[in-house]
Image (cartoon, rainbow, N blue to C red):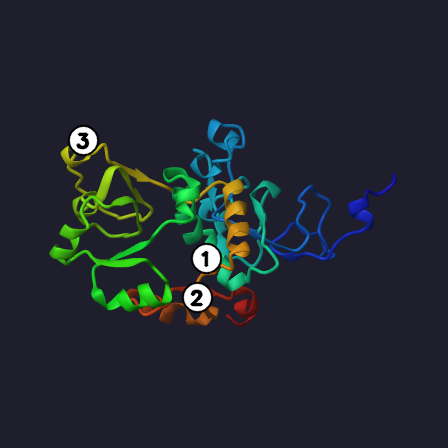
Amino acid sequence: MKKSHEEEHQVKAFGWAVRDPSGHLSPFNFSCRKKVGVECFVAACNTCDMCSQDLENYCANMIWTYGCTYHDRTTTYGGYSDFMMADERYIVCIPDNLPLDGGAPLSCAGIAVYSPLKYFVKIAKAFGIKVTVISTSSSKKGEAIDYLRSYSFLVSSNADQMQTAKGIMDGIIETVAIAHPLMPLVDLLKSHGTLVMVGAPDKPLELPVFPLLMGRKSVARSAVGGMKEMQEMLDFAAEHNITADVEVISMDYVNIAMERLAKGNVRYMFVIDVGNTLGDT
């Protein structure tokens, strides 16, 4: 039998790709032949309404890249794995100019912000939007304005600032992962504004309904994005030279990193270099 073009002209694999024992790409339909990545999930049913709309992240049978049971009953370990296997539908191309360390966090934190911006705010407006950073402390103001280039800064514990900012925001992306009051943020919204929560507090939050009624305001949730949107986000980041600010660490530094993380002593994410340190642990 005559070999296919892919079998006769195999391309060396770089990144997490399906590979045969020779270390070359096995014949499959995935068009990317350079750096590739596995995102927040490795599989879904591929047949439900959500999957048919490229919203695999909302599929009831979606399998996370970490802490879930795969089709073969094995546990997924995400970035802690020594190798990964995924259907080509759940693999993305990593643009050449997007570094792996600065690009990896975009697959979680990046898409968590990109997706609600697209869905809840018109695209043309979202990508030209004036950003206000809201924090509980004024200590981050210089960093937000000078380094992150935000338009303005608001201290949520400052009653005067919060009063002045009432009713001026089209939307708020809320990233807090602990229980906290929502009403001060809802008060900042214009009529028809939306508070989008991407954090995941472990305790129920109190949400009075009446203030929402009096401005047709909304509170919504958003969880990462589908594969089509994932690829779009990575391409957008590469085009505009957007990367995450990270500190690359080795596997044996993880416990110390967790202690620093609890103290807020990281700017802004740790990235574990598993590939170069796996053999040393």
Viewer-nearest of discs 3 and 1: 3
Judged left or right of residue 56, residue 97 is right
- What residue is pinned by disc 3? 213
At 34% across and 52% down in the image, what residue appears? 130
- What residue is pinned by disc 2? 246
CB contact under 8 Å: marks 3 and 1: no
- What residue is pinned by disc 1? 105
Residue 153 picture location, percent across and down: 26, 59
Query: Which residue occupies the foreground of this view, 186 or 169?
Result: 169
Q: Is residue 101 above or below residue 78?
A: below
Mark nearer the N terminus (3 vs 1):
1
Number of marks present in the image shown: 3
CB contact under 8 Å: marks 2 and 1: yes
At 44% across and 66% down in the image, what residue appears? 246
Mark nearer the N terminus (2 vs 1):
1
Residue 168 picture location, percent across and down: 23, 46
Residue 17 picture location, percent across and down: 63, 52
Outermost residue, left side:
159
Give the SS element for disc 1: helix
The three-letter amino acid code for the residue at tag 2 is Val
Give the crowd class for mark 1: few <14, some 14-19, many >=20 residues within 10 Å. Answer: some
Residue 80: tell me if it is visible: no
Label 2 to label 3: alpha-carbon separation: 41 Å
Outermost residue, right side:
1
Label 3 to label 1: alpha-carbon separation: 37 Å
